[in-house]
Amino acid sequence: MKPELRVKHSSKHCYHCYFKTGGKQARVYMAIRGGTTNIEEDIACLITELFGEKLDPSKAEIRRFLKEKGLRIEDLIKQATKEQLKRCFLGVTEAIEQLEQS
């Protein structure tokens, strides 16, 4: 039996891949994060959403901001609404939604 691979472009931020060979199959969900695919862009977006401060999306700048506020990234995520998380982590949230539907 010939291996089967299907890739579905769910949106510009999320891909659903299906692979089958013999009796084995796998589903993979890929999320594209940010314009340069780094998570710092998403975290800087969330900081802007929550605090109204526009940060450079660099590790050093995010670290400085969090230390100044006495926060961790987990704290930002807990404070954010579902809508804010969707806006800033679009690829990741789309992949999670697709996993929930399958």
Image (spheres, grey):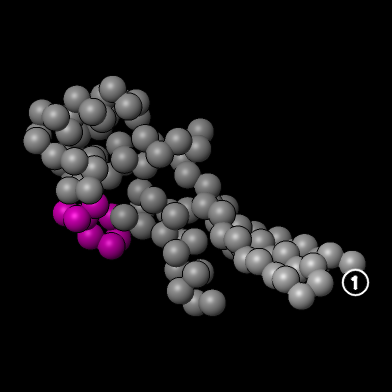
Residue bounds of the magenta highlight: 77-84
Drawn side of residue 94 relative to residue 59, left or right: right
Residue type (three-letter) at the residue carrying disc 1: Met
Vertically, is 56 above or below 73? above
Q: Is residue 8 visible?
A: no
Say how many tags the image has.
1
- Is residue 50 on the magenta stretch? no
Query: Which residue corresponds to the image point at 56% horizontal and 60% vertical from the top-left?
Result: 29
Query: Which residue corresponds to the image point at 9% horizontal and 34% vertical from the top-left?
Result: 69
| Image quarter of the N terminus | bottom right
Drawn side of residue 97 relative to residue 43, left or right: right
Vertically, is 87 above or below 33? below
Vertically, is 54 above or below 32? above
- Residue 77: x percent and y percent? 24, 52
Query: Which residue corresponds to the image point at 54% horizontal and 77% vertical from the top-left?
Result: 102
Drawn side of residue 9 relative to residue 44, left or right: right
- Residue 3: x percent and y percent? 84, 65
What residue would you read off at disc 1? 1
